[in-house]
Image (spheres, rainbow, N blue to C red):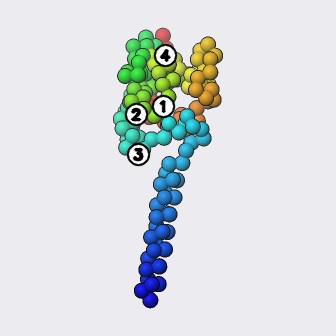
């Protein structure tokens, strides 16, 4: 009788252990490519990123000249499709290849969409960013480019 209880307890422990491993693996499922894996964020990081998001309904407008002043990894603004993103805190997380810094202070639309430079040179995988990356980018939105 005791032997059956011990065996049953052991089997239950194994099942619980396997379930915990499966849950952890599901939470850490990779995105569609290796580079995109770097865009995974934890709940805490996501909350921190939300602080960068524009608050309220007031739309902020920036000139390209203003954006150009934020041109390094310690102060990095990007323009993508005429929207301005402050990705400084994202770069600080260290979860993205350094090629993102090529877009600091510039219109990085082509770099983001096609992963190519303005001259057509392939950067990183050379494939467009995923939908997950596009959603993640919205956490860093701070305003639009002002029409000059």
Rounded to the nearest angstrom, the CA distance separating label 3 from label 1 is 17 Å
Residue 94 locus on image (x, y percent): 42, 32
Rounded to the nearest angstrom, the CA distance separating label 4 from label 3 is 29 Å
Q: Please identify the quarter of the rendering in which residue 139 is found.
A: top left
According to the picture, the residue beneath numbered tag 3 turns out to be: 43
Residue 105 locus on image (x, y percent): 45, 16
Q: Residues within 10 Å of mark 1 (few under 14, many from 20)?
A: some
Q: Which mark is residue 145?
A: none
Residue 44 locus on image (x, y percent): 37, 43
Label 4 sits on a secondary structure element that is: strand
Q: Residues within 10 Å of mark 2 (few under 14, many from 20)?
A: few
According to the picture, the residue beneath numbered tag 4 turns out to be: 106
Q: Residue at 44% across / 70% down in the picture? A: 13
Q: Residue at 51% across / 58% down in the picture? A: 22
Q: Which mark is residue 96?
A: 1
Looking at the image, is mark 4 or mark 3 earlier in the sequence?
3
Q: Residues within 10 Å of mark 3 (few under 14, many from 20)?
A: few
According to the picture, the residue beneath numbered tag 2 turns out to be: 93
Marks 1,2: beta carbons within 8 A = yes
């Amino acid at each position: 009788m005791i032997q059956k209880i011990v065996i049953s307890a052991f089997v239950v422990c194994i099942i619980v252990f396997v379930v915990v491993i499966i849950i952890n693996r599901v939470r850490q499922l990779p995105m569609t490519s290796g580079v995109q894996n770097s865009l995974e964020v934890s709940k805490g990081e996501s909350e921190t990123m939300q602080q960068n998001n524009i608050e309220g309904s007031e739309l902020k407008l920036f000139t390209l000249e203003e954006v150009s002043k934020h041109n390094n990894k310690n102060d990095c603004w990007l323009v993508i499709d005429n929207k301005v993103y402050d990705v400084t805190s994202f770069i600080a997380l260290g979860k993205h290849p350094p090629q993102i810094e090529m877009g600091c202070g510039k219109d990085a639309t082509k770099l983001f969409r096609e992963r190519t430079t303005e001259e057509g040179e392939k950067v990183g995988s050379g494939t467009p960013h995923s939908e997950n990356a596009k959603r993640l980018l919205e956490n860093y939105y701070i305003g639009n480019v002002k029409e000059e």
